[in-house]
Image (tube, grey):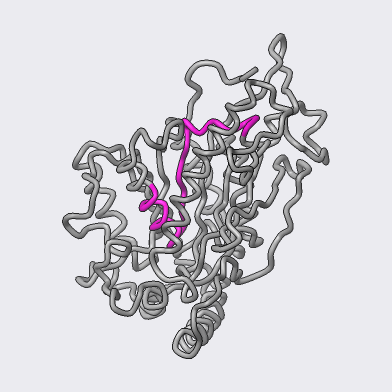
Amino acid sequence: MPSLTVKLYSIFFKLHKRYQLHNLTLQAQTQSSSFVITSRPDGGVVPSNPSFFDGVATKDLHLDPYSGLALRIFLPGTVVDSSLNDGHVYKGYSPLTTGKNIGYKKLPVMLQFHGGGFVSGSCDSVANDAFCRRIAKLCDVIVIAVGYRLGPESRYPSSFEDGFKVLNWLKKQANLAKLGNGKKERHVFDGFGLSMVEPWLAAHGDPSRCVLLGASCGANIADYVARKAVETGNLLDPVKVVAQVLMYPFFMGSVPTSSEIKLSNSYFYDKPMCIQAWKLLLPEDEFNLDHPAANPLIPGRGPPLKYMPPTLTVVAEHDWMRDRAIAYSEQLRKVNVDAPHLDYKDTVHEFATLELLLQTPQALACAEDIAIWVKKYISIRGHEFSY
């Protein structure tokens, strides 16, 4: 069973969430949605730090002033010499020297989508910043945390479209970087002068090894982006989604599973709260627990599962949404997709990403397990340096 601290914190967390959902429901009923929100953190936020603090440098980007779509990039210190890896403000394009080789180390890129029931959370929250730093170091990847639009100000499919928009932005960045003709000190703009190449990604990002990772509702977004990537195919070149990680996805459906019945009043996120969150995301005339965004098990949800990328699913013992996530994983395995699921004992929904639980043994083990699995699909093919 979860510890007494977790149980007590869960009580206060639920009270806060119910109050928040109640206020957002009233807001949705009385106010027009003429503005957007991409950050509604449950705790504090962490400013970006372009120096290599604790082995990772971070920077914030704002992609779209109209939608508010924001990113935080996490760059591991392995891309530079150790002499620059502690407190050095990194502007990009600092060659890494390894023996006789001098070049720019290329790392896989991971798009990360935070949780929060589609109505809260932030890519720069204390918890999300700490989790992304941990994953960036363990996997040795560039993590791009996505600050997508939140409900009820922005209804479905806004947050899902934001996820795919970042994948297309990554493609554009890769193509802009090629315009430098190898001279990475140049500032390269697109044909209309609207977008400048991002130096960290240009120097060190390898979009042909792209991984998607989502926690809770972020897992739903990650799965949507993976499906869109499959449908788009070669039009995304050079971006290739090689794997995805779904951490305790926010799946549900009209026909309850065994866990949805037995654990409906479970820790942190009970079923009535989650249904209310879905009501704040989906347009009123579209609300349905079997909506394609909510239920991965409904028939006719394209593309065919056999084309999906390898998918690791993480579930918690005391999470009422666990059974549907496991069932989705089983469907993928039936069509020969590498889709294991990891089940963690004595854990709750968001056990590896909530601020209070980040240092628990289960959270640490989960991050390490994710890194071991992800590395199977991001291993270097050919030379890891570009010149």
In this picture, which residue range is highlighted in magenta?
202-225
Q: Nearer the viewer, residue 180 or 54?
A: 180
**Camera-side residue: 98 or 149?**
149
In the rendered structure, the answer to whether residue 73 lies left or right of residue 216 reads right
State the residue lying farthest toward the left. Answer: 299
- Residue furthest front as drawn: 192
The residue at the point 45 percent across, 69 percent down is 117
**Residue 206 highlighted magenta (yes or no):** yes
Residue 349 x, y percent position in the rendering: 44, 64
Q: In the rendered image, which quarter contains the C terminus?
A: top right
Q: Position of residue 304 (x, y in %)?
A: 21, 44
Q: What's the residue at 43%, 62% (across, down)?
A: 217
* Rendering coords of residue 137 (x, y %): 62, 39
Question: Could you tell me if residue 258 is visible in this image?
Answer: no
Q: Is residue 174 above or below residue 121?
A: above
Closest to the observer, 352 or 285: 285
Question: Based on the displayed image, in which of its 4 quarters is residue 54 positioned?
Answer: top right
Which image quarter: residue 140? top right
Which residue sits at x=48%, y=82%?
Answer: 21
Q: Can residue 85 be seen by looking at this rendering?
A: yes
- The quadrant of the rendering that contains the N terminus is bottom left
Q: Is residue 48 left or right of residue 242?
A: right
